[in-house]
Amino acid sequence: MQDAYTSEKFSIHVDAFFPEAMSDVFVYMNEETARKWDELGAEPELANTMIQVSVGDQEVTIVVDDPDSGVIPRFLSGLRSVLSMDIFTASAKGVAA
């Protein structure tokens, strides 16, 4: 992932998906794709290889190239499901309550 404001890059890991202080990030398909974005910028060959996630006080905005292409529809559907869950009462596998 990359902070959209500072350009700082970091890997997603089990302990933290979205760092607390960040409100706008780019999430790349993989490290190779992130390097290509750095080298080429927004080229047609890189369509649907990165998403932008912006978090506001009461909303989450996801920016994609084409919401009907490739795995993007499944990703968006899964994200909608997760965001509609009551995460404060849900249990996570492997996490003690």
Image (cartoon, rainbow, N blue to C red):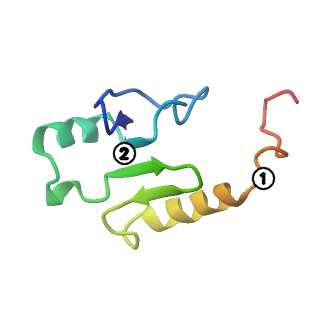
| In the foreground, 50 or 94 | 50
Image quadrant containing the C terminus: top right
**Badge 1, how many Cα within 10 Å: few under 14, some, many 20+?**
few
Image quadrant containing the N terminus: top left
Label 2 SS: loop
- Total count of labels: 2
| In the foreground, 73 or 25 | 25
- Which amino acid type is shown beneath numbered disc 1? Asp
**Badge 2, how many Cα within 10 Å: few under 14, some, many 20+?**
few
Residue at (57%, 65%) from the top-left corner?
Answer: 77
* Mark 2 vs 1: CB contact within 8 A: no
**Distance between the Cα atoms at labels 2 and 1?**
28 Å
Q: Residue tagged by mark 1?
A: 86
11 lies above or below 89: above
Residue at (39%, 26%) from the top-left corner?
Answer: 10
Left or right, residue 78 beside residue 76? right
Which label was assigned to residue 29?
2
Residue 38 image point, x, y percent: 17, 37
| Residue at the limit of the structure toward the left, as seen here | 40
Residue at (53%, 28%) from the top-left corner?
Answer: 13
User: Which tag is nearer the camera, tag 2 or tag 1?
Assistant: 1
62 lies above or below 40: below
- Which amino acid type is shown beneath numbered disc 2? Met
Residue 14 image point, x, y percent: 60, 29
- Mark 2 or mark 1: name the one nearer the start of the chain: 2
Residue 86 image point, x, y percent: 78, 53
